[in-house]
């Protein structure tokens, strides 16, 4: 693929996604490269609905194929929260520190063995011709009782990856990008592109 726009302004995501698209797409632009890029209202009930909505608006605005990732953290004992509200768990415009503090507080009385969680990623590709595809990925883990590591972004320091003795924020970018929810969805996207091109 020659030119693709990724429909996000989140610097953490842009960084990871550009690495995941290396060798696959010649030119990768993001929302940050355009003036007046539409701010999609993420009011879908699922990650898939929100990803599709973001990709549709981005493709319509730029006239380019658009890729949108909607992702978040689902904590079993919290009935799936923060879920689709992951970015604004502690309120509109809340940053990672406030969201993580609220997560720790909500998990305070949950025993360690009941702290199962998953990061989920829905990835939507929408072309100007109206073709729409969805790819998904998921990684399971547990919510820690205190932050560990300073790599990655978002809830990474509070997420102990299943099968590892490290939090997601203690993994290097290349380690995270070989196993994360986003990496799995991108692997499916990559296979799809390789099939059609
Ligand atoms: P979105 O931009 O609406 O998809 O919101 C995603 C939110 O989910 C981010 O702001 C983070 O809080 C969280 N999130 C998604 N992916 C990750 C990840 O890989 N690590 C940590 N937090 C993530």
Image: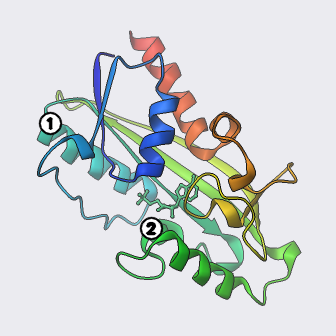
Q: Do the residues labelled 2 and 1 touch (CB within 8 Å)?
A: no
Rendered image quadrant of residue 106 = bottom right
Q: Position of residue 144 (x, y in %)?
A: 78, 71
Residue pointed to by mark 1: 62
Tell me if mark 2 has few (under 14), some (14-19) or many (20+) residues whose alpha carbon lies within 10 angstroms of its own.
Answer: many
Could you say where residue 188 lies in the image, as x and y percent from the top left?
54, 29
Q: In which quarter of the image is the N terminus?
A: top left
- Colour setup of the view: rainbow
| Residue drawn at the location 72% of the way across and 70% of the way down | 147
Which residue ends up furthest to the front in the rendered image? 150
Q: Does residue 131 sit above or below 101 in this rendering?
A: above
Q: Which residue is drawn at 46% across and 12% down?
A: 195
- Residue denoted by label 2: 87
Residue at 43% across, 61% down: 46
- The residue shown at (21%, 43%) is 58
- The quadrant of the image that shows the C terminus is top left
**Residue 13 in the figure: left or right of residue 129:** right
Pick whichever of labels 2 and 1 is earlier in the sequence: 1
Does mark 2 have its CB less than 8 Å from ligand 1?
yes
User: For this rendering, which residue is in front, 25 or 57?
Assistant: 25
Query: Any mark on residue 103, and which?
Result: none
4 lies above or below 55: above
């Amino acid at each position: 693929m020659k030119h693709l726009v990724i429909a996000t302004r989140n610097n953490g995501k842009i960084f990871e996604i550009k690495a995941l698209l290396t060798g696959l797409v010649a030119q990768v632009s993001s929302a940050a490269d355009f003036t007046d890029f539409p701010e999609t209202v993420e009011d879908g009930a699922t990650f898939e609905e929100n990803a599709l909505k973001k990709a549709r608006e981005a493709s319509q605005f730029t006239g380019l194929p658009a890729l949108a990732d909607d992702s978040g953290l689902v904590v079993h004992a919290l009935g799936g929260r923060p879920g689709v509200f992951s970015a604004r768990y502690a309120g509109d415009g809340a940053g990672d520190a406030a969201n993580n503090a609220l997560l720790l507080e909500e998990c305070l009385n949950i025993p360690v063995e009941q702290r199962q969680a998953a990061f989920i990623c829905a990835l939507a590709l929408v072309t100007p011709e109206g073709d729409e595809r969805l790819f998904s990925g998921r990684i399971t883990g547990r919510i820690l009782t205190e932050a560990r590591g300073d790599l990655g972004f978002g809830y990474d320091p509070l997420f102990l990856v299943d099968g590892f003795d490290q939090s997601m924020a203690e993994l290097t970018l290349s380690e995270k990008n070989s196993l994360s929810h986003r990496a799995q969805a991108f692997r499916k996207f990559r296979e799809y592109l390789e099939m059609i091109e």
